[in-house]
Image (cartoon, rainbow, N blue to C red):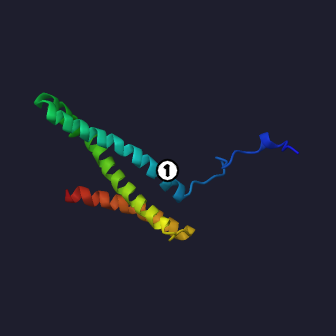
Amino acid sequence: MADVNRGNRPLSPHLQVYRPQLNSITSILTRITGNALLIGSLMIVWWFLAAASSPEYFAVANGFVTSWFGDLIMFGSLWAIWYHTLAGARHLIWDEAKMLDLDSADKLGWAVVGGSVLLTIFTVIVI
């Protein structure tokens, strides 16, 4: 028989009771950082094309890339590279069927988040 209460049930997961978990947040961030890296990459390609075009066009592109907004985009791209790399390493560990229990997965999630921040700060200081 058909389920007559189908319209009365909440969606799954119900947004008022669902608490985002670290694994879901890190998974979403992996997708976001992968797509966000395109912005930084396109900016670098634009800078190289401007350098190959003319000094006047390079001055415009270089002015944007070295502005505070360009620096912000490049800093965010640097963090995204480190985050995406560490998240990929985490997936390689999981592909070997290791550290799949919830406690280990949470530790790996925090390692990816914290490691990406530390490596970004280290890279900015060193370079």
Q: In this figure, which residue is indicated by the disc labeled 1?
A: 28
Quadrant in the rendering for residue 55: top left
Q: Looking at the picture, does residue 98 appear above or below residue 44?
A: below
- Identified at 25% across, 41% down, the residue is 44
Q: Quadrant of the N terminus?
A: top right
Camera-side residue of 41 and 10: 41
Residue at image location 78% in from the left, 39% down from the top = 7
Say how many tags the image has: 1
Tell which of 103 and 50 is nearer to you.
50
In the rendered structure, the answer to whether residue 36 lies left or right of residue 99 reads: left
Residue 33 % position (x, y): 40, 48
The foreground one among 98 and 24 is 98
Q: Nearer the viewer, residue 1 or 87?
A: 1
| Rendering coords of residue 5 (x, y %) | 83, 43
Q: Is residue 124 above or below residue 53?
A: below
Q: Is residue 67 visible?
A: no
**Residue at 20 percent of width and 40 percent of height:** 66
